[in-house]
């Protein structure tokens, strides 16, 4: 049976998403709505075309091939757009670009095969990221089982919000799992991500049943979760419930803001800020004091 799915990007030669040289596959769809999200194009499972105004020369090549006769400012007529991608093919500057595409799983696999030699020589492999990779379980299952059969090392980056039993076999094929714990306080978790953290906390415990190495990540967002109490309680929970896990603290960044413009979506105006290196080191010391080892892939 043919399997396909919605893919944001295949990023070759990635070195921050696990060991060695990797290809990171960003799968669209996410059950969370974090107010600081830097991948807004990956929230929904459907094709999406973006328009980067700053790259647009106004040449008109896009409108000449558009079946809906949409002009160069895509965001003025976004509701008309069928995301057919014809404009992206002819745009000379990359101002129009496919941000989410429907791809066939076997096409993805043949793309990955090209870089297999780099994975082998660097101790790398393939990383599934998102959006949320587990939001497309059929595609993830198909890709991971084929790669497992080819003995390619796999890593999963997840927000942790999934039904464990439904994806347990997929998780068991991974060598490394990064899982987020954004906020320990459930009210704040709901306020900032739109969902409760109970499912995520339970899944952290369940990961003890899986042989993969685990790194629990906290994206440290100034003004949201950078208080000592949040970091201490999170590290304590990890130590008590998943002793084999390490942790990683990732400082907030604003690299995704330009994508909001490209898809015509307003960016949250909240006062988030990036923690200073000194503050981050202080928070890392709190994690260490709770008996949890730290990793740093960035
Ligand atoms: S979990 Fe990640 S992709 Fe999903 S909304 Fe939050 S930041 Fe965005
Ligand atoms: S083809 Fe690209 S550069 Fe030309 S008008 Fe359209 S978006 Fe702008
Ligand atoms: S994706 Fe298709 S419908 Fe949308 S603007 Fe481009 S050509 Fe027109």
Image (tube, rainbow, N blue to C red):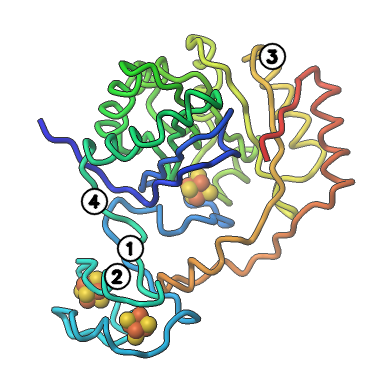
Extreme left residue here? 1
Q: Nearer the viewer, mark 3 or mark 1?
A: 1
Of 224 and 249, the residue lying toward us: 249
- Residue designated by label 2: 88
Return the disc, 1 or 2, that comes first in the chain's sequence: 2
Return the disc, 2 or 3, that comes first in the chain's sequence: 2
- Is any part of residue 80 visible from this angle? no
Q: Nearer the viewer, mark 4 or mark 2?
A: 2
Residue 251 position, x and y percent, is: 72, 48
- Residue designated by label 3: 240
- Residue designated by label 4: 102
Is there a contact, CB below 8 Å, between mark 2 and mark 3? no
Disc 2 beta carbon < 8 A from ligand 3? yes
Q: Which mark is residue 294?
A: none
Is there a contact, CB below 8 Å, between mark 1 and mark 2? yes
Left or right, 230 with reference to 6: right
Residue 167 position, x and y percent, is: 35, 23
Q: Which element type, helix, strand or loop, lies under badge 1?
A: strand
């Amino acid at each position: 049976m043919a399997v396909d799915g919605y893919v944001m990007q295949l990023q070759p030669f990635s070195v921050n998403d696990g060991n060695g040289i990797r290809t990171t596959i960003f799968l669209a769809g996410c059950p969370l709505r974090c107010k600081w999200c830097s991948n807004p194009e990956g929230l929904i499972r459907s094709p999406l075309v973006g328009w980067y105004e700053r790259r647009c020369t106004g040449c008109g090549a896009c409108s000449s091939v558009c079946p809906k006769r949409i002009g160069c400012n895509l965001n003025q007529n976004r509701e008309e757009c069928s995301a057919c991608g014809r404009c992206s093919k002819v745009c000379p500057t990359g101002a129009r670009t496919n941000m989410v595409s429907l791809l066939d799983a076997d096409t993805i696999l043949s793309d990955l095969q090209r870089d297999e030699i780099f994975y082998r020589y660097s101790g790398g492999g393939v990383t599934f990221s998102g959006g949320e990779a587990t939001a497309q379980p059929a595609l993830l299952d198909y890709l991971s089982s084929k790669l497992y059969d080819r003995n390619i090392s796999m890593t999963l980056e997840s927000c942790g919000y999934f039904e464990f039993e439904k994806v347990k076999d997929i998780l068991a094929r991974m060598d490394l799992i990064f899982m987020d714990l954004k906020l320990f306080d459930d009210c704040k978790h709901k306020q900032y991500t739109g969902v409760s953290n109970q499912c995520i906390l339970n899944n952290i415990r369940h990961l003890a049943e899986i042989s993969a190495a685990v790194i629990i990540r906290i994206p440290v967002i100034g003004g949201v979760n950078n208080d000592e109490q949040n970091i201490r309680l999170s590290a304590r929970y990890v130590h008590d419930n998943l002793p084999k896990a390490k942790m990683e603290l990732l400082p907030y960044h604003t690299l995704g803001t330009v994508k909001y413009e490209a898809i015509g979506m307003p960016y949250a105006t909240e006062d988030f800020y990036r923690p200073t290196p000194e503050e981050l080191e202080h928070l890392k010391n709190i994690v260490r004091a709770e008996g949890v080892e730290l990793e740093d892939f960035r």
